[in-house]
């Protein structure tokens, strides 16, 4: 069969207009595949075709081809020759100017599928004779690949056209030519399945990619309740009014079911694929319910048990702003201010501020400066006692990268990484350097008592290794103190069911990807230097009811804060008695803290009377390595194992 080189390239149709559409606007210039794309040209194309229901397929093919071309690592088949004169693809992922989220998701999905099946698609083109061996594919290779991938997903049934379609001419030409060879293309796929004894095309994927896909299909849709707008019980009632019913376990989730999460009291799970339906509810539209993966909620929930009244918090790596907003809602009752770092530009800053306003958040301030350039003596941050670091990472724990991109606005390059079985070592090494820098800088602030480090990675070099080395580095370079920082057990509340397999001795919270949740990592680093934090310990103890300070009892002078009263009382004590008091309060605070972590949300803690009896001593429940693994009869099991 002759090699297919007769297609017209996109630039040949720049001035011809859309076929079969009288008076249609001409295609914009600058749409040559593989070249730098004019952003204005892409916007023009999107505007002219996006809202035309008869041209949706061609818009998807066009943009998916551009995105695939910018992300593809090169040919997978060694039977295809590379043009030696062509430059290596080093372009960043193209921006897709389509405004319709449903259409944009279809573009991302098709480009991602083409990346995953790239090796198979190239083999089909060669085995069917559509491509000749040792040929050099031309600039139409990218749209050929995405259209072929879509055909394969349709089991090579011809796409049903919607009457008189508005078309992009070069896409139309490629699609018609591929349709002429459906039988041979389908036969080539069948031969590949027989060769590898694959029950489905999914079984032709690399093992790790297939496992992620299988879990991702079953992954619930998670959302957190904005308690500034609505209480948890009120949200539950509102969901029932929307037609949802509460279920008792994740195994029982059905189309109209929802489940309150055991570990994060304000998080709710819905069946897989519920995002679009939820987005149409008044709860989501009104900012009462915020759709976000559960793994993104563990960081904020690890911070809140460790702060007290008036403690400010820094969040490094705001991203979409959803995690920062969640942290702000959880800390609002403490009269805390959250400072967000990692804003890209003024446009994003406006978006983040609008979102915070929509959610009713008033205790959040975004600082558009580089966090690494902010001095640890900055007066704006003088009351910061906790830092949440969510650095850029490999996202190796993700199961649904397209869903994540749609919600978090993530870099499209993760589609390339997630379509492969292994991750780019050079990129990982670069990320580790940045992660170390951010974590070490977070520990420099003099009043910071705790740093929470959270990633969506399952790679040890980005997780345990980074935290351990950063703590060792900081401790070695902190003059005058001994081991000022120590890795402590995670503070996410564990249910009795989770603790059935005690003992729990791990210092890190590690979650492996499964059908019930994506993968992630959380570490908590606490300052152990007593001299620097004695005042904070006493103030925290007073706030928790372990140490009584009251105006009626003469403890607080007129206009005096708890911190000021603590400092005054400490000055009256002799060094020996002061040290004994501090040690006693440290032990009491730690014992109470462990008990609180086993009982859930900080709101329960706040309702406790300051004169309550000391809680019974319980075994520490925050010392667990938690691995979510899929079992044949249960979607999730907590395995708790030792970690040295």
Image (spheres, helix red, strand yellow):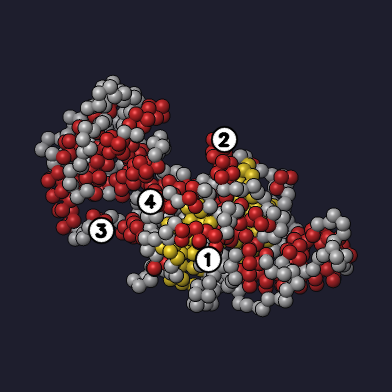
Q: Secondary structure at mark 3?
A: helix
Left or right: residue 263 compared with residue 245: right
Q: CA distance from mark 4 to mark 1?
A: 28 Å
Q: Nearer the viewer, residue 53 or 139?
A: 53
Q: CA distance from mark 4 to mark 3?
A: 17 Å
> What residue is rendered at 30% in x and 56% in y?
206
Give yes or no for contact between labels 4 and 3 (Cβ–Cβ under 8 Å).
no
Sequence-first tag of 2 and 4: 2
Q: CA distance from mark 2 to mark 4?
A: 30 Å
Q: Which residue is mark 4?
A: 418
Q: Local crowd at mark 2 within 10 Å, few (<14), some, or many (≥20)?
A: few
Disc number for residue 346: 2
Name the image quarter holding the C terminus. Answer: bottom right
Disc number for residue 263: 1
Left or right: residue 510 compared with residue 136: right
* Mark nearer the viewer, 4 or 1: 1
Q: Residue furthest front?
A: 241
Q: Nearer the viewer, residue 642 or 302?
A: 302
């Amino acid at each position: 069969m002759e090699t297919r080189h007769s297609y017209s390239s996109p630039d040949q149709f720049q001035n011809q207009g859309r076929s079969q559409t009288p008076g249609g606007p001409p295609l914009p210039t600058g749409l040559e595949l593989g070249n730098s794309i004019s952003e204005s040209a892409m916007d023009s194309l999107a505007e002219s075709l996006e809202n035309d229901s008869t041209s949706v397929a061609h818009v998807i093919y066009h943009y998916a081809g551009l995105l695939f071309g910018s992300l593809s690592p090169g040919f997978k088949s060694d039977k295809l020759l590379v043009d030696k004169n062509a430059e290596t693809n080093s372009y960043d992922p193209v921006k897709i100017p389509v405004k319709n989220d449903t259409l944009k998701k279809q573009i991302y999905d098709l480009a991602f599928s083409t990346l995953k099946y790239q090796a198979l698609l190239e083999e089909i083109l060669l085995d069917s004779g559509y491509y000749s061996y040792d040929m050099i594919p031309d600039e139409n290779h990218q749209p050929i690949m995405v259209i072929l991938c879509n055909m394969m997903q349709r089991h090579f049934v011809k796409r049903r056209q919607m009457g008189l379609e508005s078309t992009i001419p070069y896409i139309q030409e490629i699609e018609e030519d591929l349709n002429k060879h459906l039988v041979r293309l389908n036969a080539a796929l069948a031969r590949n399945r027989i060769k590898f004894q694959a029950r489905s095309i999914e079984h032709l994927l690399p093992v790790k990619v297939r496992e992620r896909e299988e879990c991702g299909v079953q992954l619930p849709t998670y959302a957190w309740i904005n308690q500034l707008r609505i209480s948890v019980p009120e949200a539950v009632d509102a969901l029932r009014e929307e037609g949802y019913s509460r279920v008792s376990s994740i195994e029982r989730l059905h189309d109209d079911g929802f489940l309150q999460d055991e570990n994060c009291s304000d998080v709710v799970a819905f069946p897989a694929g519920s995002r679009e339906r939820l987005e149409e509810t008044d709860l989501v539209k009104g900012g009462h319910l915020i759709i976000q993966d559960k793994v993104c909620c563990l960081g904020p929930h690890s911070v809140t048990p460790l702060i007290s009244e008036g403690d400010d918090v820094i969040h490094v790596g705001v991203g979409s702003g959803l995690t920062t907003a969640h942290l702000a809602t959880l800390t609002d009752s403490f009269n805390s201010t959250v400072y967000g770092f990692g804003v890209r530009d003024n446009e994003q800053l406006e978006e983040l501020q609008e979102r915070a306003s929509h959610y009713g958040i008033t205790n959040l301030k975004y600082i558009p400066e580089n966090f690494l350039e902010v001095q640890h003596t900055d007066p704006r941050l003088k009351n910061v006692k906790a830092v949440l670091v969510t650095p850029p990472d490999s996202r190796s724990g993700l199961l649904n990268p397209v869903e994540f991109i749609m919600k978090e606005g993530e870099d499209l390059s993760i589609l390339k990484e997630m379509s492969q079985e292994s991750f780019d070592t050079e990129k990982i090494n670069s990320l580790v350097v940045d992660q170390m820098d951010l974590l070490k800088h977070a520990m420099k602030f003099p009043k910071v008592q705790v740093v929470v480090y959270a990633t969506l990675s399952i790679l040890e070099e980005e997780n345990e290794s980074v935290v351990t080395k950063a703590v060792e580095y900081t401790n070695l370079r902190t003059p005058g103190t001994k081991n000022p920082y120590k890795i402590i057990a995670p503070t996410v509340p564990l249910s009795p069911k989770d603790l059935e397999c005690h003992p729990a001795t791990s210092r890190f919270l590690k979650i492996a990807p499964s059908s019930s949740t994506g993968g992630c990592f959380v570490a908590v680093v606490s300052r152990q230097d007593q001299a620097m934090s004695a005042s904070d310990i006493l103030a925290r103890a007073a706030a928790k009811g372990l140490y009584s300070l009251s105006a009626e009892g003469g403890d607080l002078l007129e206009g005096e804060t708890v911190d000021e009263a603590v400092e005054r009382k400490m000055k009256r004590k002799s060094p020996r008695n002061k040290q004994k008091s501090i040690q006693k309060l440290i032990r009491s605070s730690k014992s109470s803290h462990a008990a609180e972590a086993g009982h859930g949300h900080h709101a329960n803690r706040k309702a406790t009377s300051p004169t309550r009896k000391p809680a019974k001593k319980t075994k520490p429940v925050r010392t667990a390595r938690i691995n979510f693994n899929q079992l044949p009869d249960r979607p999730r099991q907590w395995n708790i194992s030792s970690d040295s």
